[in-house]
Amino acid sequence: MEHLSLDVLRTFLSIVDLNGFNKAAEKVHLSQSAISMQMKRLEEQTGQTLFERKGKQRLLTHHGEILLSHARQLLRLNDEILLTLKETRLKGKIRMGIQPDFVDSPLTASVYRFIQHHPDIILDLKVDSSNSLQEGLTKRKLDIIVYLAKEKNHAFNTVTLKTHPLQWVGAPGYTTGKSPFPSSSSDPNAKYGSPSPPPLLPPEHPGA
């Protein structure tokens, strides 16, 4: 019986989690052609088509979804075994802050797994606004925070986890009024948390 490669399964998960072969290639430090060959080999081993093209996207097939579930379990078990055998027990307290946006996200699942792997770690979790979290980190009331921001705060070491484009969506034929955003980020009154959307103006009618 053939054995599935854990490295190939990690590549498979990276493709799914990062929504594409290009970003997955960067994460696993392989060329796109190399991970394409890995996925081709994985399909040959399983005897199933794992991805299907829809436009420019490659989406999981039904069998790909099945493999995804088992691959996550297998890799999680592998990591747990290594952690247990290495007997590296971390101890202490971590004061972590996150925005409400991340409460119901994959981030919380990752934090939960970390605590499971390190039962001697005490997690003090605070859920608050971006400004409050940054203030808490600056005053050393928090050790680490995850927050949304327009730009990096150079008062502390910041790592960008992901970027999200901001878009206003209106009905066809409608136009937006004046932008609610200040023209310059240096405006001391500028706030970039959760701004109210710009007012929607009805379409102009000739002769009205």
Image: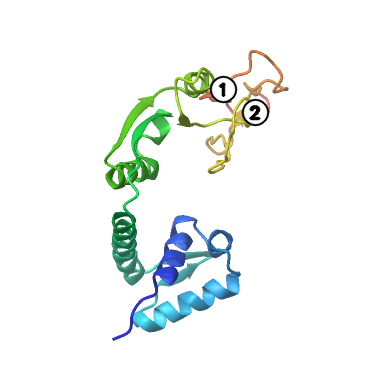
Q: Secondary structure at mark 2?
A: loop
Can residue 59 be seen in the rendering of this structure?
Answer: no
Q: Count of labels shown?
A: 2
Which secondary structure lies at badge 1?
Answer: loop
Determine the residue positioned at 26% across, 41% down.
119
Quadrant of residue 204 in the image?
A: top right
* 87 left or right, relative to 196: left
- Left or right, 132 with respect to 33, comes to left
Q: Nearer the viewer, mark 2 or mark 1?
A: 2
On the rendered structure, is 101 left or right of 180?
A: left
Earlier sequence position, callout 2 versus callout 1: 2
Which residue: 37% across, 82% down? 45
The three-letter code of the residue at mark 2 reads His
Disc number for residue 9 = none
Residue at 56% from the left image edge and 75% from the top image edge: 34
Tell me the quarter of the image containing the N terminus: bottom left
Q: Furthest residue to the bottom?
A: 1
Residue sitting farthest toward the front? 87
| Residue 139: x %, y % from top left | 51, 17
**Along the line of sight, the residue nearer the viewer: 184 or 6:** 6
- CA neighbours of label 1 inside 10 A, class few (<14), some (14 to 19), many (20+): few
The residue that disc 1 covers is: 199
Please tell me in which quadrant of the rendered image residue 152 appears. Answer: top right
Identity of the residue furthest to the top in this view? 189
Instruction: Identify the residue shown where x is 35% and y is 49%.
Output: 88
